[in-house]
Image (cartoon, rainbow, N blue to C red):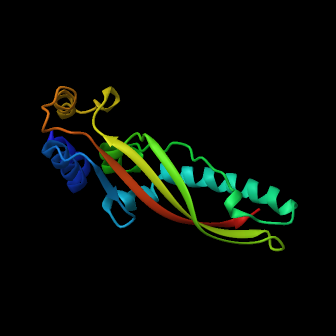
Amino acid sequence: MSGVLTMLAGIAGLSAFSRFVAGTGGTAIHGPGSTLGSMALASGSFLRTVAWVQANIEAQLATQASGGVLNPSALAVTPPATFFDFSDGWPLKAVIGGTQGEELFATGFTGSIPLRSYSIDLRFIICDDFGVDESDLYAPGLFAFWVLQHERSPTRYVPFINQLELPVTVRGTF
């Protein structure tokens, strides 16, 4: 099992497996400088999520501008779920894969109605329950992993949350 995750995801896979086996539980945070965080920031799946969010923000800003005021506090965007596949990189698929939750925060904003332009700093938080379900059974070593997770001892083999914290600055026009 550790061999499969190490082969698929390198040190990120081994680290996730070690945490699972140790029964640590809790939350593992992966920021923009981590292996998984930097891969996620550049991945096609995440960039599609960012593009969707940007289009939604621009539509709301255009509506606000027609009323004469830009109010970033009134923006309401629920990002679509981000799912990582092998095209995003084997470590992202093996360690994160499908996700179970996503939050979005605006941490900074500048905008100009006359120029119809803006810049917004966003913080995406993407959560995944690290573990194996039936859709993850694409490598033989993962079958044993599934058994450990679903028929585990009370002190070992504890799933945990992987949390990607991804800052993004989006600029555009509306």
* Depicted 119 relative to depicted 98: above or below: below
Between 153 and 1, the one lying in front of the other is 153
* Residue at (41, 50) in percent of width and height: 88
* Count of number-bearing discs: 0
Pick whichever, 113 or 50, lies toward us.
Answer: 113
Where residue 107 appears, x then y in whole percent?
A: 56, 67
Relative depth, front residue between 101 and 44? 101
Q: Residue at x 18, y 27 (%)?
A: 147
Viewport quadrant of the N terminus: top left
Q: Residue at x 68, y 53 (%)?
A: 55
Residue at (79, 68) in percent of width and height: 116
Q: Is residue 171 left or right of residue 169?
A: right
Q: Quarter of the image for the C terminus: give it.
A: bottom right
Residue 26 lies, in percent from the top left, at: 27, 48
Residue 5 at x, y percent in the picture: 21, 44
Nearest to the observer: residue 2 or residue 109: 109
Image quadrant in which you'd find residue 2:
top left
Image coordinates for residue 9, horizontal then vertical, percent: 25, 50
